[in-house]
């Protein structure tokens, strides 16, 4: 992978679920249950390297099968079985190597990698949701929507769509 500062990196993409009010998380987890979104997440990340922050990793039930995990943390002592640890985005990209790499959160990690991503795979939750972790909307002068797949929400699910954005 290229290093930070060299513009969009081929194969680097964000996987984000975001409500209309910017909420992406609540108390270390997702503030909604959308099985179709979990299936899409699995399909998008399977057999790829996933980069995430420590809190995002710790919110998972463990390492995700058939994915290489790179966790960015400021704690030089932190480790977990089956995880490569990086102190910054340059190190994470170096560890990730070539091929498609999915950045999966949280908010600080998305902010670090958004300028480097070539696309965003967004689950757009079409309603405001209560939560304690937010991120800003993606700047339309930088991103162009190329696909939108509205989903039929099941009983109790919020309205949502799967959206693909590519860098302008």
Image (tube, rainbow, N blue to C red):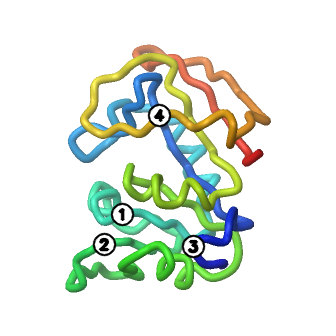
Q: Position of residue 9 (x, y in %)?
A: 69, 67
Foreground mark, 3 or 1? 3
Q: Residues within 10 Å of mark 2 (few under 14, many from 20)?
A: some
Please give the residue where the numbered disc 1 appears in the rendered image.
53
Select label 3 or label 4 by which is in front. Answer: 3
Could you tell which of marks 3 and 1 lies nearer the N-terminus? 3
CB atoms of marks 2 and 4 within 8 Å: no
Q: Give how far apart the Cα atoms at labels 3 and 1 are.
A: 17 Å
Camera-side residue of 141 and 56: 141
- Marks 1 and 4, Cα distance to the nearest angstrom? 17 Å
Q: Which residue is mark 2?
A: 73
Question: 80 above or below 53?
Answer: below
Q: Provide the secondary structure element on which disc 3 rests.
A: loop
The answer to which of 47 and 70 lies nearer the viewer is 70
Tag 2 and tag 1, C-beta contact below 8 Å? yes
State how far apart marks 3 and 4 are (Cα).
Answer: 25 Å
Q: Secondary structure at mark 2?
A: loop
Which tag, 1 or 4, sits closer to the chain's start? 4
Few, some or many C-alpha atoms within 10 Å of disc 3 (few <14, some 14-19, many ≥20)?
Answer: some
Q: Position of residue 65 (x, y in %)?
A: 49, 67
Residue drawn at 57 percent across, 37 percent down: 138
Q: Which residue is mark 4?
A: 18
Say whether disc 2 or disc 1 marks the residue closer to the N-terminus: 1
Secondary element at tag 4:
strand
């Amino acid at each position: 992978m290229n290093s930070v500062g060299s513009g969009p990196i081929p194969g680097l993409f964000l996987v984000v679920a975001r409500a209309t009010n910017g909420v992406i998380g609540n108390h270390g987890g997702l503030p909604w249950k959308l099985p179709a979104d979990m299936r899409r997440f699995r399909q998008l990340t399977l057999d790829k390297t996933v980069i995430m922050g420590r809190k995002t990793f710790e919110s998972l039930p463990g390492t995700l099968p058939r994915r290489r995990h790179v966790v960015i943390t400021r704690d030089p002592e932190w480790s977990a079985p089956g995880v490569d640890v990086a102190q910054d985005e340059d190190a994470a990209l170096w560890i990730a190597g070539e091929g498609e790499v999915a950045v999966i959160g949280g908010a600080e990690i998305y902010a670090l990698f958004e300028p480097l991503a070539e696309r965003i795979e967004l689950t757009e939750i079409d309603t405001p949701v209560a939560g304690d972790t937010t991120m800003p909307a993606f700047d339309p002068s930088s991103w162009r929507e190329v696909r939108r797949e509205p989903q039929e929400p099941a009983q109790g699910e919020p309205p949502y769509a799967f959206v693909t954005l590519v860098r302008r």
